[in-house]
Image (cartoon, rainbow, N blue to C red):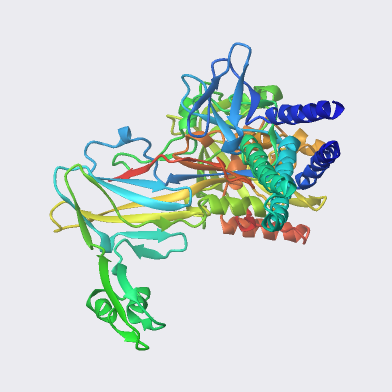
Amino acid sequence: MKKNLLYFILIGLLLAILSSCSSYQTFSVKGTPGTIIRSPNNQQLGVIGNTGETKITLRRKDGYYHYLQAYVPGSSVFIPFALDYQNKKNIVRDYYQGLGYVLAGVGVIAELASIPMVAQDSENEFALGMCIGGAGVSLLGLGIWELARYKGGRIKHEYAYQKFQTTNTDIVNAHPQLGNVEYKSMGAGISTVDSQLTNANTENKAITSDAQSEDSDDEYGWVDEMFGDEYLKMDPKPNEKLFTSFDYFIDKSGKMIAGKYEFNLEFKKDIFNLKVTATKKGSTTATTICDFHIQELSYNIDDDWIMIGFVERNTTHTFLFQKNYLKPAKHSAEDIWSGKSSSSSFYHVSNRKEIEASVLTAMLFNDSPSERFYEHLKKSLVSYKGNCKIENVKDKI
Amino acid sequence: MLMRKTTFFDFLALLLAIGFLPSCKTQFLNVRGVAYQSVRAKEYVGTRENIPLDATIVASYLVRADGQIEVIVENNTNSIMTIDRTRSFFRNANGNSIPYYDPTVRVNTQSTMSGESTGASVNLGSIANAAGIGGALGTALGGINIGGSESKSTTNTNTTYYIDQPQMSIAPHGRAAMGRLFSIEGLGIDFLEQAIANSQTDVCNMFTPNHSYASCSVCISYSVDNGRTFDTLLSNIYANSLIVSKVKQTGQVNAALRNIYMGKRDALVEPWYLLYFSSDSKEWNNKVKLTEIIDYK
């Protein structure tokens, strides 16, 4: 009786555990109410409700979804967001698969062992039972193995989606505009217009020396991200206009500040003696807003950083950048000093009000500076420190 | 009987324990990083609405996730357009120019043989088939035997010849594919996989047409006066961004993706972009915005 009870408990336990092995994974996605969540193949999976979240269920057998898409009604883009996961072993499935293997193996062995006995004595009940039982056990084993595999989703990797996922609708604008575009004109040559300038809804700031002096640090923050129309000439002449850039930048809060000025970078004598002029749109008069002289006072910090000073009148702008990556900053100066940032490369660490400095930064350290500029910079730095190594980031990839 | 039952239960308990042994094998998921690249034409046209009504030719460039580019040409006139494929070129970043016209004749032969043979002989018909020899010669060889044994067989051969056309015509307001796919070095999933593997830190770079790590030009020679005069449409395609964002903490993939959005605010509105997740798992691991890149003249 006790044995029968044990038998039922054992079988019940097996069935209960097996039924708990789900073929699906469920998690919550948080975001703006009304946001539609879609799969990579645009199948709607759910809509975020007024609670700010929705439950999403994915089949294990579909494999790991690296991302889903969020769509805010009325916006112009589907915004992919990645699904975070944790490594989690599916012990139940693994166990049943293992059990299935073992049962199948034992069943086959029992069956094979019984065959000679049955051949010798076809009346041998034990041998017959072993033969039939062995076949049954091996079939049972295969069944358990396949069921566990099916319910476990036939996956190759062990993972579980994090219980809470977040959309990226908070950092991607619902109607992003293409930046830095050289539009094809209709017969009048190439016009260079930045759509982000024309589409920015922010208040335009007058960029003059006087205007700058009235702006507080808080208003302008610092240069966090900047763009220009980067065409640094390969072989510039003295007093030649090198570069034209429309002024705009992103302030501390992520707001884009569009300007009314066109900036020009001009050589005074050579690449280390420059001036920046600003021309108000619609005006023909250019105002020199800063003269730059690159001071050769570079030095290393922890062998990874180079600092270069620019002198504008009585103000020194100090730029810090990682040796191997010459490009505009993506993080704030505070992040650098506090060590929070490790991936960005170029920072304007002083005189936050000087927007023209940011323009110059964008111009000098544009996305792909010319080799000639690298050479100049390298010589300058080497003359001071001797060990500075400047490489084009392209060579690093 | 009771003894046998007891043995069975003990045996079952033993199986339960043994079942755990094979379950120790584990392969965890590992998503290493997220990479992004985008492609533009040097002169941005935008959508089809921006194409002027008096444009003669419109070219659509379709870049695939593997970095291959396909060109579709559209005749925007009321005349028949002739494309000279011998003078239409794909030029890659290192300056190599390849014409769209490929004079190589490609042959596809399919043979079937039926029949019976006896003995250990070698039947030359099968050799002919294996060597791709078709037509009359293949059929003749089918009857030749070595070794004195017998063979009766019939060979049916279908041979298809692919010959490139030096010129192609497009009906008024019609469209046609240029017919050859070319790979743009530096674009595609394989490149991004390498970029993630080789980058020690995050990378966020924007590129101008003249300094891009991946670029190409397509030159299409066309005529709308029955081949008397030819004009050209030259389009420059280039990768204008490359962002690599490593997954810093196991499983925190979205943080890496958010870095990309922070680095490039217009990432999702580029005419063409490829978002790629480097991972052991290959399901749903990339997103390509396959919008056509348009140019016209």
Q: Which residue is drawn at 66% across and 29% down?
A: A22
Q: Quadrant location of the N terminus of chain B? A: top right
Where does the image place residue A95, in percent across and percent down from the top left? 75, 40
In this rendered view, identify the residue nearer to me: A176 or B276: B276
Determine whether, in the image, residue A113 is placed left or right of residue B213.
right
In this rendered view, identify the residue nearer to me: A302 or B221: B221
> Is A51 rendered above or below residue A262?
above
Determine whether, in the image, residue B51 is placed left or right of residue A359.
left
In this rendered view, identify the residue nearer to me: B180 or A344: B180
Q: Which residue is drawn at 50% across and 50% down?
A: A240
In this rendered view, identify the residue nearer to me: A320 or A31: A31
Q: Which residue is drawn at 46% across and 59% down?
A: B93
Residue B111, image quadrant: bottom left
Q: Residue at x 37, y 88 (%)?
A: B147
> Is B265 rendered above or below residue B188?
above
Q: Disc count in the image? A: 0
Where does the image place residue A260, in percent across and percent down from the top left? 50, 28
> Is A387 rendered above or below residue A135?
below
Residue A211, image quadrant: top right
Determine whether, in the image, residue B195 is placed left or right of residue B84.
right
> Is A212 rendered above or below residue B22?
above
Q: Is residue B28 visible?
A: no
Q: Is residue B54 visible?
A: yes
Where does the image place residue A98, in percent across and percent down from the top left? 73, 44
Q: Residue furthest top?
A: A50
Where does the image place residue B151, in percent across and percent down from the top left? 31, 79
